[in-house]
Amino acid sequence: MKRRNFLAATAAATLVPAATVAPVAAQAKMILKATDVHPLGYPTVEAVVRMGTKLEQATGGRISIQMFPSMQLGGEKEMIEQAQLGAVQIARISVGPMGPLVPEMNVFNLPFMFRDSAHMEKVVDGEVGDEILKKLSDHPTANLIGLCWMSGGTRHVYNARRPITSVADLRGLKIRMMGNPLFVDTMNTLGGNGVAMGFDQLISAMQTGVVDGAENNEPSYAGGQHYRYAKYYSRTGHLIIPEILVFSKRSWNALSASDRTLIANMAKEAQKEQRQLWQAEEAEALRKMIAAGAIVNEVGNKREFQDAVRPVWDKYGAQHQALIARIQAIN
Ligand code: BDP
């Protein structure tokens, strides 16, 4: 069976009551499959695992979450497709690859959009965050429900060749970017060569020299031991991208109204929990990667990087001026 057909077949089976003799459908057991590129223990994964425990407690074991971590189901592109089909119910993904699907989300993907993580968190916690989650849920073809936001820190460039202190240092470096033309354009505008590929392909691409490096937050770099292939970690801080917990719309439509409310509320709690876990992990990851040999440097002049990416703002931001102004006005 082709992978896609297999996924469709398992999708249909997932929400079927486990107990065939259950007298009422409301008592049927439901196992929600969840997936994440990160390993067990990573803040996003841990928050969803805890959400599963709480769901079990709240429903006397009727609803639970089965976690497939560590890219077991592929990179984010595959995870999104599987959630769209209903082969998994919950996927924790970056907003990065969502931009081509829901245009408003690309505003969060603009380089230097947020002043810092606190600004990003304030934006997603408020009206703008709610509106964008709703845009996703209401989207006619995205087939996903936006449950809540998670924090993904600040992304910096890392590579095997040299520390990046100014824009000129990026010249000619092949840097892996997430699958979204906006990111490839960002790297190219800075003078590097942006190469789009899944997170699941990155280590082998660094090992074989297909890319010289990539860009990510400290926990992803340290957790994936990327310092083994690209030891220069330069704090460009070019992206602060929120992450998002999505639910398969196909599976969502099969839930009772009360189960939907329960899951939505638990997801909001997971958002808070993840943020606390994130703050501790970010500091710990920086310590670990330095101990493992990463060479961390600050860039000389952030402004130079910000000025260099203006063409990306012109190309991708022009149609979202009002939204951008609202985000910038949030203090
Ligand atoms: C990590 C995000 C993850 C992305 C990954 C990437 O948590 O969702 O898949 O970056 O670069 O920071 O693809």
Image (spheres, rainbow, N blue to C red):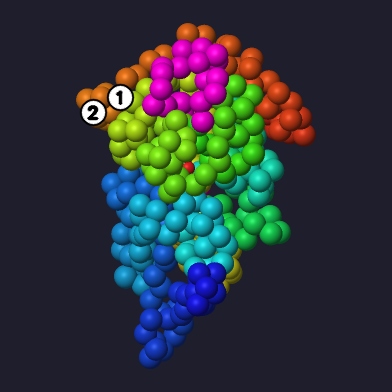
Residue 60 pos. (x, y %) = 32, 70
Query: Secondary structure under badge 1?
Result: loop
Q: Is residue 60 left or right of residue 99?
A: left
Q: Quadrant of residue 65?
A: bottom left
Stretch of the chain drawn in magenta: 148-174
Q: Nearer the viewer, residue 175 or 56?
A: 175
Identify which amino acid the numbered label 2 is placed on: Ala
Q: Residue at x 74, y 30 (%)?
A: 315
Does the beta carbon of the residue at mark 1 sit less than 8 Å from ligand 1?
A: no
Please report contact status of discs 2 and 1: CB closer than 8 Å, yes or no: yes
Q: Is residue 25 left or right of residue 50?
A: right
Q: Which residue is mark 1?
A: 294
- Compare residues 118 and 6 and report the one nearer the observer: 6
Regarding residue 266, the answer to whether it shows in the image is: no
| Magenta-colored stretch includes residue 164 | yes
Q: Which element type, helix, strand or loop, lies under badge 2? A: loop
Check the image and report above or below for 132 versus 139: above
Which residue position is annotated with label 2? 292
